[in-house]
Image (cartoon, rainbow, N blue to C red):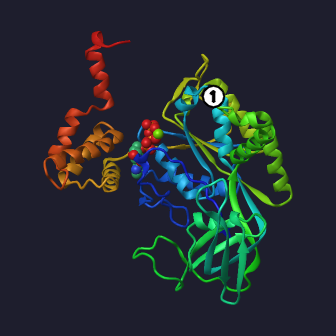
Amino acid sequence: MEEVKAIPKIVKRSVHSHITGLGLDKNGKALRIGGGLVGQEEAREAAGIVVQLVKEGKLGGRGVLMVGPPGTGKTAIAVAIARELGEDTPFVSLDGSEIVGSQRKTETLLQALRRAIGLRIREERVIVEGVVAELKYVKRQTPFYPYPTVGGARITLETKDETASYTVGPEIAEQLMALNVRKGDVIMIDTETGAVRKMGKARDKGEKRFDIEMEREIEIPSGPLKKKKELVRTVTLHDIDVSVAARRVAFSGLLALFETERELGDEDRKQANEVAKKLIDEGRAELVPGVMFIDDVHMLDLECFSFLTRAMESDFSPIIVMATNRGVTKIRGTDVESPHGIPRDLLDRLLIITTRPYTSEEIREIIKIRAEEEEAPLSDEALEALTKLGTERSLRYAVQLLEPARIMAIRRGALKVERRDVEEVARIFADLKKSLETVEKFKDLMIY
Ligand SMILES: Nc1ncnc2c1ncn2[C@@H]1O[C@H](COP(=O)(O)OP(=O)(O)OP(=O)(O)O)[C@@H](O)[C@H]1O
Ligand SMILES: [Mg+2]
């Protein structure tokens, strides 16, 4: 089975780039250090179960809330969940403040929700697949263009068992050119749409072009050139919305093409839902509920929360994972206090995972991993100094000082970050406590 297009994961902050997964063993037990994560075993094991529920499609209508003090890995674990879900499960990540700051909050939410729902479409196509044995382009001179253009091509393809030559028109020839198809490449042509795909380079075929080949080497196909093949492709509901809207514009005449902002309407989404439902009913597609992650969820207001609660009940709903570091606080836009600033009816639908503060042992390990990731070699003493800062101030502060400390070391011409570099950057960069003290001290001079 084949993957035509995977949905790229959008993970914004590179402070989590060291995280590759949840670091669980095959029984779902957390390794002390694994996947770039350290400690926080219960939360990681719980997250592992969430991943399994998502994969089995059993979390519909519910969500997950990550709760814990700042810098205890809530966002890190959400990122790890995304890594565990694999390429074709959509994962969308947003910030509470980004949502309430947008012009149309519910539109932002709705679009994110639809980007987080995938549809795995299976299609049986008749294709021609083989190794390129011969390829000649036919040039064509047109009165509209001063240079010759591609008029078509003559291509010979072979499998282990069959060889045939085809004459193809300009549409296919242009794709062959754009893909830079050469002798020895394995290609596939969809006989219905004419879409060309380069699968890779045939092993032991064709001349070696570069010392370091980026292209995938694959086996020479066997059997007949022309065959039926099942193609699998995952698109999101948002992709379908966009293509429905594009079609609407195409039919609404030339002028619509010049509209500066093309907006998705309810009607487009309704039609897209129908397209999706039909594909599912006919057994041609299956739903892949992905994950929508909302960080700092206490920033959302009542309007957003009601919208989300309703969205969770709909036929198409992703799994919503939220994170907060707030305790009992007012729900934004109201005078009502509630746990984590989240309305009761939504809270009732959430599985809660908590994260706890780290021990200094764990902080040391996390700093070590981050230092490796940022290629900032630390002396033992520097590591101790950072661990101390991480324990006494915050993990985030210690992690954020790594890069400046590395720059300090380079300026000294040193190969390693030493204690003095850490002390120096800790002196010139403030943590939150110090920055607040500064505001307090100079409050008469501050602008409010
Ligand atoms: N258990 C862990 N293992 C490895 N790295 C971690 C771990 N926990 C946190 N980190 C790293 O420490 C930094 C702070 O963690 P993170 O941003 O996930 O905290 P948070 O709980 O989301 O905090 P906040 O409440 O402020 O949003 C990040 O760089 C993160 O990748
Ligand atoms: Mg966070």
Q: Position of residue 357 (x, y in %)?
A: 40, 42
Q: Position of residue 376 (x, y in %)?
A: 26, 53
Q: Is residue 413 visible?
A: yes
> Is 88 left or right of 271, judged from the image as shown?
left
Q: Is residue 333 above or below residue 115?
A: above
Q: Is residue 357 visible?
A: no
For label 1, the SS is helix
Quadrant location of the N terminus in the rendered image: bottom right
Q: Position of residue 188 (x, y in %)?
A: 67, 72
Q: State the image quarter where residue 230 is shown.
A: bottom right
Q: Residue 393 versus residue 80: which sits nearer the camera?
A: 80
Q: Residue 314 versus residue 118: which sits nearer the camera?
A: 118
Ligand 1 quarter of the rendering: top left
Q: Report which residue position mark 1 lands on.
A: 105
Residue found at x 55% / y 62%: 28
Q: Residue 113 versus residue 269: which sits nearer the camera?
A: 269
Q: State the image quarter where residue 268 is shown.
A: top right
Label 1: few (<14), some (14–19) or many (≥20) C-alpha neighbours in 10 Å: some
Instruction: Give, as a three-letter code, the residue at label 1.
Output: Lys
Q: Residue 160 versus residue 343: which sits nearer the camera?
A: 160
Residue found at x 56% / y 75%: 182
Q: Is residue 55 above or below residue 129?
A: above
